[in-house]
Amino acid sequence: MDTGISKVAEPAIQTTLPLKIVIVGHVDHGKSTLVGRLFHDTGSLPEGKVEAVRAMSEKRGMPFEWAFLLDALQAERDQGITIDISQIFFRTEVRNYVLIDAPGHREFVKNMVTGAAQADAAVLVVDGRDGMQEQTRRHAYLLHLLGIHQIVVAINKMDLVNYSETRFQEVGTEVRAYLADLGIDLQHTIMIPVVARDGDNIVARSAHLPWYDGPTLAGALDELQPPVTSLELPLRMPVQDVYKFDDRRIVAGRIESGHLQKGDTILFSPSNKRARVASIESWGVRTPVMATRAGQSVGFTLDEQIFVERGEIASLESNPPMLSNVFRGRIFWLGREPLVAGARLKMKLCTGEYQVEVEKIERVIDTQDLGSNEQAYVERNAIAEVVMRSRRTIALDPFDHNQFTGRFVLVENYDIVGGGLINMDGYADQRQTNRIKSTNIFKVEHRVPIEERWKVNGHKGGILWMTGLSGAGKSTLAFSLEQHLFRKGYLVYVLDGDNVRHGLCSDLGFSPQDRVENIRRVGHAAGLFARAGFLVLTAFISPYRADRDRVRAMGPDIFHEIHIDADLRTCETRDPKGLYKKARKGEIHEFTGVSAPYEPPTRPEMRVDTAVHSIEECLAQLDEYVSSNFALVSR
Amino acid sequence: MDHLDVLESRTIYILREAFNKIDKLAMLWSIGKDSNVMLWCARKAFFGHVPFPLLNIDTEKKFPEVYEFRDRYIKEWNLECIRGFCPPVEQMDPSLPPAARSAARKTAGLKEMLAKHQFSGLIAGIRRDEEGTRAKERVFSPRGEGNTWNFRDQPPEFWDQFNTDFAPGTHIRIHPLLHWTELDIWYYTKRENIPLINLYFAKNGKRYRSLGDKDITFPIDSDADTIDKIIDELRHTKVAERAGRAMDHEAEDSFERLRAEGYM
């Protein structure tokens, strides 16, 4: 070693990652005291620290408090343990921990989310006298939203309720009920009566609480499970970059779930390109890598030179992510200004970036009683369910299926202003529908030009596509208009939802997928009629904008979107077929407007408001529209 | 995957994010143990290449071993390394305590290089466990005009979604080793057999635990002359890593002041 450089040999490494714990709870319920005591009782404090803080308290004429320790540790810049409030290391006999203390001041949710999102488990501190309070509930809700399932509940200040088992059970029941309502599996939830100040049930068992035979706080922490990698889930590898530093073209990214092996055929979404993994690339390892797994940052080459770019998600063909340009998100909003419908934001999902528009704010959630409010805006630090729409197709998974590809952040200007989890209930996987090629129906040349047909008929052909909620008046208006126009000499025909479902679409139900297929078929049938010179009137709820746009794309010149508009309450009052009643009772699932979404047209050719106008008035409006757009001779 | 694989994978992910999202990127290379681990991870991330320049801010007061190491590995690993020099201490803020004032030269040298090369992103090998203000850092940490760090109101950062958008005139510091501890660095250096300056190893009962300018850095008492002994020593010490760095200890807030002004 005469070069100033040392090299060392390599034996085995024995060390484990520390478990990350976040401490949350309502202000003054004893978080800092609990942390101070936990540090002391596990022997994690530097020598003399407690004495120093005691002396300082005496000097200032204040009674000693364990919470001062945290402040002191924060102020210390040169002790052997780490000292920032955000991340403090400590250890028990079993393992190492990183304690993340998410302070709950003004910027509460922003810091809480930043801290808690990294945690493997949480300690929720609840004052035995007060029970759950505002922040207890909000913290619990956010933990749930961030996917933290392991929660240790420390019911503190038991000395102030006379170490009462009854009171412990009361508070415990209250906490359990709330967590259960959130959908948290209570199997992982431990309730411990503690007196943080005196160290009761922190590390040592309490003599004051003989009726309690569960673990101490330290014992409960030691029983928590380390984070599991998502090996059993289908392969998801968001493409981070494609490198060409040398003659290799390497697709790089981190495997978020599943396995990837040399020779696998990989499907990239949303581009739907396929290729085989020719090699797994690496640097600094002696043997070639054949297989990789969740958690690893990898790179591989493909057997074909397909164009793949950052943002796509690599999967196996057998189990790809969903494709959609619309989804529902349960979000927490951190922006300074309230979020309103129509807001345009950048969304990041894994490595993909999309421009999205908030189409609708469905409900704002009250974390206190888990109720929801119909509110037009989402205030800072609030939680809401919103519908988002993107121009581009997004590859995604529902959060319940895969947390990594089922969550996103929102960016406005230069900052992250929110995060959310994806829920696809009621929305179709567009992977199926995207395979259907939109074709221009005027492509095939007939010997009878369409203009000739029009001339003979005295009017142009086309589609009046009526869309709207059940009960808005689509069928009523369509059949009245048909009769009226027929009498005036039009070639006119109605395609009605209920009628086609008896024949053309009798094999289809009302699932999102089936609705999509239903509209595809009807769209084609309508196109054929229109090509024959007919004026086609359709009366379908056709709730998805993407489906209507697809029909429009088949013949943009002949497609007229008519929004038969009436608000949900009006439609529900009419309820001509008694369907809303059944839907409200839960007898009909996926009912538009009740349990399935309706996406109103953004720029319809015409809007008919049946809540305001009578049938006759609406009919006159439609007649006027037909005359000015389709008539070639005056009648 | 063991503990070190998990740390390494995240570091690679962060480096690749930085390379993809930041136009003018450079990596600070102090030649110390941490920046060597960082460089090693970069070579793993980019399959043997380092696709951005290294930036060595030279105070011209480093130990000779440091310069020797630097020059050797620039050649051996075919690295692009930009050297930046620092203005004299007389030009630094006189209200700073002496050692901090001396350390501030590095910030000034860095700012000069940033302005000269128009870097929009700087990769730095700081760790959370090193020091209090570093513990509060984000992985992608925006710096205002004049390199200032607003540590009291930092943007949120979660789910490995980093702040990669920033206003003109500002830049981003990227911290790919933020989640490592001092012990992790040593375990990893050992496993990967990463070359290291021998000042870290004990000679005559003294070794350097952290390397700064030779006039404001002091060795600690130690007999640890192998990595195994260093690891063993660190597992039992209650003395902080930067205890030998005079600039940290002159005044309670001197390091915070340095960092708010743009120090690493």
Image (tube, rainbow, N blue to C red):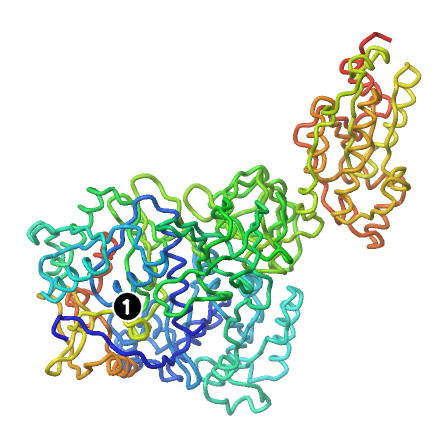
Q: Residue at x 30, y 54 (%)?
A: B50
What x and y, as percent, mark residue A138? 55, 61
Visible in this render: residue B252? yes
The residue nearer to you, when weighing A337 against A120, is A120
Circle 1: residue type: Glu
* Residue A332 can be seen in this image: no
- Disc 1 is attached to a residue of which chain? B
Q: Secondary structure at mark 1?
A: helix
Q: Residue B151 lies in what quarter of the image?
A: bottom left
Dot 1 corresponds to which residue? B130
Please indicate whether residue B98 sits to the left or right of residue A359 in the image. left
Which quadrant of the rendered structure holds the C terminus of chain A?
A: top right
The image quarter in which residue B48 lies: bottom left
The answer to whether residue B190 is above or below residue B87 is: below
Residue A545 in the image: x percent, y percent? 69, 37
Q: Nearer the viewer, residue B6 or A451?
A: A451
